[in-house]
Image (cartoon, helix red, strand yellow):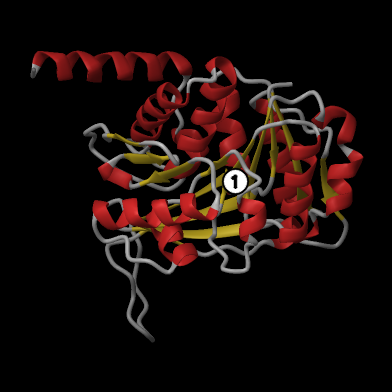
Amino acid sequence: MDIAVIGSNMVDLITYIDRMPKEGETLEAPSFELGCGGKGANQAVAAAKLGSKVMMVTKVGDDLFGSNTIQNLQKYGINTEFTSKVPGIPSGVAPIFVDPESKNRILIVKGANQNLLPMDINNATARLKECSLIVLQLEIPLPTIYRAIDFGNEHNIPIILNPAPASRELDFDYICKCDFFMPNETELEILTGMPVDTEEHIRDAAAFLIGKGVKNVIVTMGNRGVLWATKDNVHRVEAHSVDAIDTTGAGDAFIGCFSHYYVKDKDILSAIKMATGFAGLSVTKRGTQISYPSKDELIQFVKEKESSLFKGC
C-alpha cells in the first residue's frame, strides 16, 4: 500500500448559481449536480487515479449515500477494508454553491464522519504499517487526527495534514509532528491570526508557522500558485493559466496528486509542480472527483504548459 487517507467522505450537493439570494429571497438556480466528495475521499481518489495504491479509513452513513460512497471508492481501486457504516447515522453531506466566476461557498454536515474514532486507527494497524504516507484533514474528530499523527510518528510514516476546515482548537504540538502542513490562504489566516491579502503577508504567516516548529508549510493560493516554506528556503510555484469553471475540490486535487508524486519520487518541488498542474486542470470541469484528470491527461497538460512557457522566453 502506498497511501493511507484517514479522513472524511461527503455527498456533494452542488448548486450552480447566478448570485447568492438575499435574506428572505428565493431565487431559481441554473443547475444542480449530485456527486461523491469529502476532502478525504477526494484526496484518495486523486491519488488513486494517478496510479497510487490507496486505502481509506473512514465512516459512512447507514443510508443509500453510504453504500454509494463505498462503491465509488472501490470503482477507483481504493481499499475499503476499513470503510464502514455507522448504524442509524446519516452520511456526511456538503451543500456547495458555485457562482459565475467559479468561486464556491461550502457548508458541511459531518454526519457519520464524526464517528471515526481513534480505535478505528488501532483496528487498522497492520494495514497502516504497510503505507508510505498518511494523509489527514479536519472533517473528522481531533482526537482521531492526533492518534493518526502519533501512529505515523511511532512507525516513521510521513504525514500530510490539510487543516480544512480550519480550527483554532488544533494543537500546534501536533502540527509540528507532521511532515507537511498544507493550508489554503483562508485556513492560514484563521490558524495564524495574520493577514494574507498579499503574497508578502502569506510569506510572513508561513514564516510564523515555521518559527513555531512546522517542518514544511505548503500554501495553496488559488490562481496565484503555491508557496512552499521551510526554515531554510521559500519556493513559489506559479499556477497555470486556465479557463476555470468550478474550483470545488481543487485543493484536494492538489493534495492527492502531491501525495502520489511524493511517494513515487520523494522530490517535494517536483511533486508541487505536478500537483499545481493537476489542480489547474481539475477546475476546467464541473464537480469534484469527476473533474480530476487521468495521469495521461495530466502529463500532456504539463508538457503543453511547459512548452508554451519556453516559447515565450
Question: In this picture, is 56 found above or below 161?
Answer: above
* Residue depicted at 41% across the width and 26% down the height: 269
Task: Point out the image quarter for the N terminus.
Answer: top right
Crowdedness of circle 1 by 10 Å Cα count: few (<14), some, many (20+)? many
| Percent coordinates x, y for residue 97 in the rendering | 41, 60
Please tell me which residue lies in front, 292 or 133: 133
Residue 223 visible in the displayed image: yes
| Percent coordinates x, y for residue 88 in the rendering | 85, 62
- Quick check: 8 left or right of 259? right
Question: In this picture, is 124 found above or below 75?
Answer: below
* Residue 220, quarter of picture: top left
- Quick check: 218 left or right of 6? left
Label 1 element class: strand
Please tell me which residue lies in front, 66 or 3: 3
* Residue 223, quarter of picture: top left
| Percent coordinates x, y for residue 124 in the rendering | 87, 37
User: Mark 1 highlights which residue?
Assistant: 161
